[in-house]
Image (spheres, grey):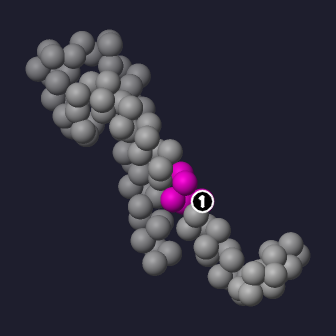
Amino acid sequence: MIYETIALRLSLTPQELERESLRLFLRHQLRLTESQLLHLARKYGVTTITELDCKVQDGQIHEDEAFEDYFTFDYLEAKRNTLLDSLEDLA
């Protein structure tokens, strides 16, 4: 297999290469997710989905203006938590 060949070239075991590859992938996905979260947070002047919900409830942001972003924000926060948990499992 290609994993074994590359691992040997790098003086790693296939398991080490797999683990480091997975760690790198998860970190990359985490950076992308956090970047998207930051974009939404700046757009509405919040840091969490809870703050966005409060601004909608207080009437500072119109619900129809933030409707889709609300669900995207929620999804991205859940994805970030999953990625962080997965990285912790690798530690």
Give the quarter of the image for residue 71.
top left
3 in the magenta segment: no
Figure check: 43 above or below 64: below
Residue 37 picture location, percent across and down? 38, 38
Q: Main secondary structure of the magenta part?
A: helix
Q: Is residue 70 visible?
A: no
The x, y position of residue 44, in whole percent, is: 27, 24
Q: Nearer the viewer, residue 91 or 78?
A: 91
- Please tell me whether residue 58 is drawn above or below residue 82 in the rendered image: above
| For residue 56, above or below residue 17 | above
The residue under the point 44% across, 37% down is 36
Q: Residue at the location (32% across, 13% down)? A: 65
- 37 lies left or right of 17: left
SS under mark 1? helix
Residue 22, percent from left and from top: 61, 67
Q: Is residue 39 left or right of residue 19?
A: left
Res 70 → quadrant: top left
Give amino acid for label 1: Phe
Which residue range is magenta in the image? 25-29
Q: Which residue is mark 1?
A: 25
- Res 15 → quadrant: bottom right
> In the shown orientation, is residue 31 left or right of residue 13?
left
| Residue drawn at 14 percent across, 15 percent down | 59
Number of numbered markers: 1
Query: Does 72 sit left or right of 28 as displayed?
Result: left
